[in-house]
Image (cartoon, rainbow, N blue to C red):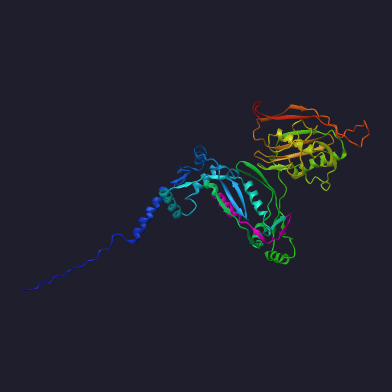
Amino acid sequence: MSEKNTETKKTSVKPLITAGSVIAVILLLFVIAAVALSGEGIAKGISVEGKSVSGMSVKSATTFIDEKISKEVPEGNVKVTFGGNDYDIAFVDVIMGFDAAKTAQIAYDMGRDGNLISNTFNKIGFLIKGVDLPLEPIVNEEYVGQFINTICETLEKVKTDDYYFMEGDKLKLVFGTSGDYIDTESFREQLDNLMRSGKSGEIILEAVPADPKPFDVNEIYENIAKEPSNTYYEEIDGKKYIKYASNGYDFDKSKLKKAIEENKGVNESFYFLPTVIKPEKTELDETGLFTEVLAKYTSKITDQNKNRLTNVHLAASKINGAIINPGDVFAYLKYVEPINVEGGYKTAKVYSNGKIEEDIGGGVCQVSSALYSAVLNANLEIVKRYAHSLTVGYVPLGQDATVSSGEGDFRFRNNTNEPIKVVADSDNAGVYITILGKKLDPSITVEIENVTTQTFVPEVIVTEDATLKPGEEVVDYAGKTGYVVQTYKHIYKNGELVETV
């Protein structure tokens, strides 16, 4: 019997799918997912207070939130514990409402603040799990700031950091002090989170001892050293602005570091003199500027008291030539202060608590009142204005603007699209104000009307005075008639009344 010889032939089969092809497929799927989930609107799966805002633009989401999502300020409060004392912050005191625009922007930014890979993974997560955002509260910053100040006032020794600032062309450096501080950033973060949740909660604060943050020479150089800039004129978004020249500064960082070391522990503060670099062009080319008269006003001077005239002329000269860019606010006191002897002012009659007295600066208010009347006629925005405690004779009733050092200021905003210029002059007969610029709408004219609605005749008040002889009377103060006046600004377009303010 013969034996049959057989041979088995083995062949290798190459895998049809390689690691490279798997990666390629994954990348392809990832790209498809990225394209599918990309878009100009808010990512899919995102909602606000349970209502979807997916696919919306920031503007449309803002409108949607404003109109469709309402939320009452919660009645809860936050208990803050510090130094063995408890403080309560009611939500109604700290939440002024809810910010639809900010909420919409947060929703829009989700899935856009990273790279392509992280953004796509995030968007896939939003789509699968969904994200519901709370409405962003509008915080009463003044209330929170006052609360933090109240807490800080209980510290025995408050830590202050080293700080610096330019005083003219000199760099002033002030050393801080060691002490305690409160981590206000952490407090604000915890408070914000509780406000978003709308649930009452507790925040425990602790005083942290620390040394002052020392001067950083590199930071100081970065903030102070700069090239000089020339005066120039530019247009931004249809509005024209004057940019004024400023000095440039430079200094040797090693010299500043040495000065800091030499003064530390010796002085509370010291000055360092950088090299001042002057700009090449400081004069303003007014070609094409201040081409139109927005308003003119004359206030007659009847009181020829020499000191009062001096004050009027001085105040008018100080505001003469003032230039206000679009959107900027003119503050009268910024120009005329200090109202004291050092500032060149004299003693004259002033109104004080309903009486006429002698004090420094009498007459300054005639210039502010004339300016106020011109600003009304120029249809500029009044930001701050106060009436006198008594009537004045140099402007119509209802058109005066008193000022006093501090917050008793007269302020207005340039609400036009070009810089405006105040031209102020005076002589012994009057104060003359002209406001130059370019009208927003040449067809608009303004008419001021003052309507007296009530008149108050002063009463006679008799008080006993033992120093006087029997039957003798002395007038301590002669009263003045008072009025309630309503001032109206009638706005006309092409001669037709369109608005009364």
Quadrant location of the C terminus?
top right
In the image, residue 116 sits, relative to residue 419, either above or below, namely: below
Segment colored magenta: 167-193
User: Residue 186 at x, y = what percent?
Assistant: 58, 55
In what quadrant of the picture does the N terminus appear?
A: bottom left
Quadrant for residue 96, please give it.
top right
Q: Nearer the viewer, residue 393 or 97?
A: 97
Q: Residue furthest right?
A: 469
- Residue at 90%, 32% in the rendered image: 473
Relative to 131, say whether 351 is above or below.
above
Task: Indicate the quadrant where residue 399 lies.
Answer: top right
Q: Nearer the viewer, residue 86 or 253?
A: 86
Work out which residue is located at the far top of the displayed protein and give it.
496
Question: Nearest the camera: 478 or 230?
Answer: 478
Count the numbered circles shown. 0
Residue 287 position in % (x across, y down): 70, 42
Q: Is residue 475 above or below residue 53?
A: above
Can you name the residue that lies furthest to the left here? 1
Query: Is any part of residue 310 visible from this angle?
Result: no
Relative to 108, 483 lies left or right: right
- What residue is shown at x 32% (from left), y 61% (from top)? 18
**Residue 187 locus on image (x, y percent):** 59, 53
For residue 30, side relative to residue 100 (left or right) = left
In-front residue for pair 279/430: 430
Q: In this image, 287 relative to 78: left or right?
A: right
Q: Is residue 317 magenta?
A: no
Determine whether 165 is above or below 320 in the image. below
Asked whether residue 401 appears in the rendered view, the answer is yes
Q: Position of residue 229 (x, y in %)?
A: 68, 52
Please say whether residue 174 is one of the residues in the magenta stretch: yes
